[in-house]
Image (spheres, helix red, strand yellow):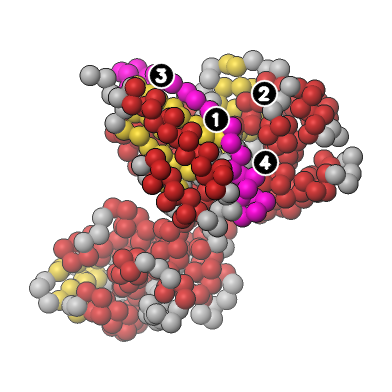
Amino acid sequence: MSEKAAVIYIGSSALYLKIGEKRADNMKILESLEYPLSLGHDTFKKDKISFEKVDETCRVLKGFLKLTDEYRIEKIKTVATTAIREAKNRDYILDQIKVKTGLQVEVLDDSEEKIHIYKGMSKKLKKLGLNDQQALMCYIGTGRLGVSLYSKGNIKYNQNIRIGSLKLSELLGKIQEKTDKFYLVLEEYLRSFTYMLQKSFPIMNISHFVVCGKEIEMIANLCEVEKEKESWYIPKDKFQNFYDQIKDKTPIQLLNMYNLSPEKSEILLPAMAIYKTVFNFTQAEKIIAPFVFLVDVLLYDTLYSEESRGWNDVFVENTIISAKSIGEKFYYNKKHAEVVTGFTLKIFDGIKAIHGLGDRERLLLEIAAILHDVGKYISLKRHYYHSYDIIYASSILGLNNKEIEIVANVARYHSAKSPNGSDINYRQLAIEDKVLVAKLAAILRLGDSLDRSHIKKFEDLKVNLEAKKLEVIGYSNENTLLEAWTFEQKSELFKEVFGIKAEFIKKRVK
């Protein structure tokens, strides 16, 4: 029996259903439906989605489910992004959808959404033979913009910006009624984001511009370019010429000129302005737009879960690269970070029997170890507070918002201050996350203490876990009194969290 699956995507401007079948060579799409419904209008204008639209959403979802029943689909994944994610009445909406349709909606945070998109784009770049090239990757949604630097198969720099085509239209729409040069307002507003990109992406010789998003298909068709090898290629001159044609037109004029829907005519110019802003940041001669859409990526991952796990492993490496790039941006002590990370992970691996954590938690600890001292860029005084702020405000590729918050808290507590209910950022965590932060911070403290001098005195480290004691054995022929004293001071949290004493033992190298 063939394996089938369905993905329902509740987007900002439409509801989507795709049903696919797993084939040996590739995924076959059996059904693809799109129902226009602008939930984003409500969220971006009023901060809430009306229950009239919620009722309409449920009615459409029931229709989708009838179709999945006809195909006898058992695997149905339902996701939502910006419109529901940012709605103040989000919890009530999700409850109504569950009660009326039985669907449990997974709301992807901004980072999770971008991870799926970048995975799909990376696969396409490999197929197009660009995996050893450098490219600026851009994903424009209706409410968010994601920009990443792709270099030789990895994503090094990553920035998520709270702006998108529909959100920009809603934000500045009233100004459009007052001027026939609205495009100048858009360009001026977006100029600040160009400055942000210059700070985030220090490498300037970017020869490829790769984009995806629902609007790019419309733009490619309006620019009258042909599809090639599962991608659109839009030459810079054609893109600029089309922009010049529409930049002083109103949405109603665009609707009549190009036979567009009201929704598409409203977001066309804002989308073009965003693409133009980022396009000009590169030296690319054309836009490369591979066929990558969130719903397709999710459907493929559902049907080909084993291959998807392999790509997840690739993205672990990208997560580490992303963290190191943030460290470089804030002039961290790279050698110290590497030493502390190595010691910390060795301790983590040596005490699996008492921490009960897995590979994902190990990755979070590794990222915290890499970035634990990054706050020294701001001030040496209470630098751990600044480390929290920098990490919390950063886009770390591969980590969702909750994981970034956990990493930020672990870095905050790597020094002398212990997790405390009086700290609002710690207090607001879920109970299980508070415990996780305490465990990881306790381990990081031990690893950090062993390089207190920042000159890597230990050639090797061994960990012995006994019933009532943890022995951390450091091999060195140097004076390590400072490290031994620091270890003793920092081991208090470990004893409090795990209930056993951590003891440092020095042995000479033979």
SS at mark 4? Answer: helix
Q: Nearer the viewer, mark 2 or mark 1?
A: 1
Q: Closer to us: mark 3 or mark 2?
A: 3
Residue 249 position (above or below residue 86): above
Q: Which residues are magenta?
A: 22-47
Count of marks placed on residues: 4
Image point (37%, 58%), residue name: 364
Q: Is residue 25 one of those drawn in magenta?
A: yes
Q: Quadrant of residue 142?
A: top right
The residue wearing badge 2 is: 220
Q: Mark 3 = which residue?
A: 30
Task: Give neighbour class at mark 1: few <14, some 14-19, many 20+ (Cα, 10 Å).
Answer: some
- Residue at image x 57%, y 76%? 379
Q: Is residue 370 above or below residue 448?
A: above
From the top left corner, tell me how far across and down residue 48 is, in percent: 59, 53
N-term mark: 1 or 3 = 3
Between circles 4 and 3, the one closer to the viewer is 3
Mark 1 is on which residue type?
Tyr
Q: Which residue is mark 4?
A: 165
Q: Residue at 48% x, 33% y: name it.
A: 60
Q: Nearer the viewer, mark 1 or mark 3?
A: 1
* Residue receiving disc 1: 35
Specify few, some or many for label 3: CA neighbours under 10 Å numbering under 14, 14-19, or 20 or more.
few
Precedes in sequence: disc 4 or disc 3: 3
